[in-house]
Image (spheres, grey):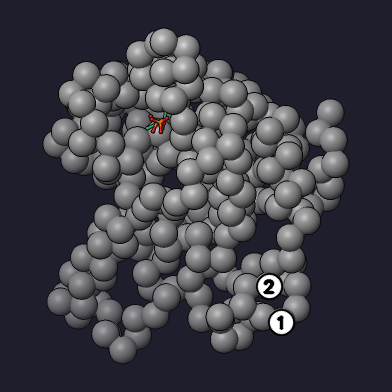
Amino acid sequence: MYEGVDLSRVPRHVAIIMDGNGRWANARGLHRTQGHAAGEPALFDVIDGALEMGVKWLTAYTFSTENWSRDEYEVEFLMHFNVDLLQRRRDELHAKGIRIHFIGDRNDPRVPDDLRKRIEDAEELTRGNEAMHMVFAFNYGGRNEIVAAVGEIAAKVRAGNIEPEDIDAGTIAAHLYLPEMPDPDLVIRTSGELRTSNYLLWESAYSEYVFTPVLWPDFDRHTLAECIVEYQSRNRRFGSAEDLSVPPRRGGTDSPAGDRD
Ligand code: FPP
């Protein structure tokens, strides 16, 4: 089914930049938003494949802080699409034992109230699920995430709860949007673009990247398996000379790899 994948070494956390919806639509004479709509079945096929292969965390970039600069119609479409998708798909994810999380600035006044409410409801409903964690990076930006963490830490310093000299990488990691989320082992970007685009900046410090030319609506569980095969062919060294199968603790200073390169 998943040819070539070593199911005993599947990445624990796969994070995806779903890119190429606009180009997929343009090539068919469709509107860009129809490309986004075609991205939904791709995402849900990938969710099923990830679940079957034993991936424990899957993160998908559904709306970036930079996406607000797209034309008003497309922004409006993506906002409604996120609301609608949560409405239609939440119970299905719940039935599969998937826990839903959102990372990003959900309190931004531009985010509609009904979406914020649906996000909270979905997180609450699925809180006890353990089959897989599905993280939607929505109104997410890696720099914003770090800025928000620094702001929280600064407030604690001002209140006398943290001493500045005690701040280390673990302090930052503990103040990110979802501190319990492990760092991604594998980051996939579709559509042939070779950028990280502000995605999981802190968390992906030691991730393996796989870039595929496939446009997102054409991606599925089999393309995911191919990316995992590519990932499994790499040596993960975390800055050390040896291949290390165990990643350093997230953002911590107690890395088994010692000094990082
Ligand atoms: C990037 O393609 C994609 C997005 C900005 C939106 C991602 C949304 C989906 C894949 C649909 C699934 C949606 C949800 C809410 C789960 P692009 O528009 O930048 O494509 P282009 O680079 O070809 O123009």
Name the residue at 25% across, 59% down: 148
| Side of 48 where 125 appears, left or right | left
Few, some or many residues within 10 Å of mark 1 (<14, 14–19, 20+)? few
Q: Is residue 246 visible?
A: no
Give the labeled residue for mark 2. 237
| Side of 147 where 226 appears, left or right | right
* Kind of residue sitting beneath label 1: Ala
Q: What is the x, y in percent for residue 246?
A: 70, 68
| Side of 224 where 122 appears, left or right | left
* Kind of residue sitting beneath label 2: Arg
Name the residue nearer the viewer: 78 or 100.
Answer: 78
Name the residue at 38% across, 45% down: 103
Mark 1–mark 2 Cα distance, whole angstroms, equals 6 Å
Name the residue nearer the viewer: 113 or 248.
Answer: 248
> Contact (CB < 8 A) between labels 1 and 2?
yes
Name the residue at 25% across, 26% down: 75
Which quarter of the rendered image does ligand 1 occupy? Answer: top left
Q: Secondary structure at mark 2?
A: loop
Q: What is the x, y in percent for residue 69?
A: 20, 36
Name the residue nearer the viewer: 129 or 67.
Answer: 67
Name the residue nearer the viewer: 59 or 218.
Answer: 218
Q: Is residue 120 visible?
A: yes
Q: Secondary structure at mark 1?
A: loop
Q: What is the x, y in percent for residue 211?
A: 58, 46
Give the labeled residue for mark 1. 241
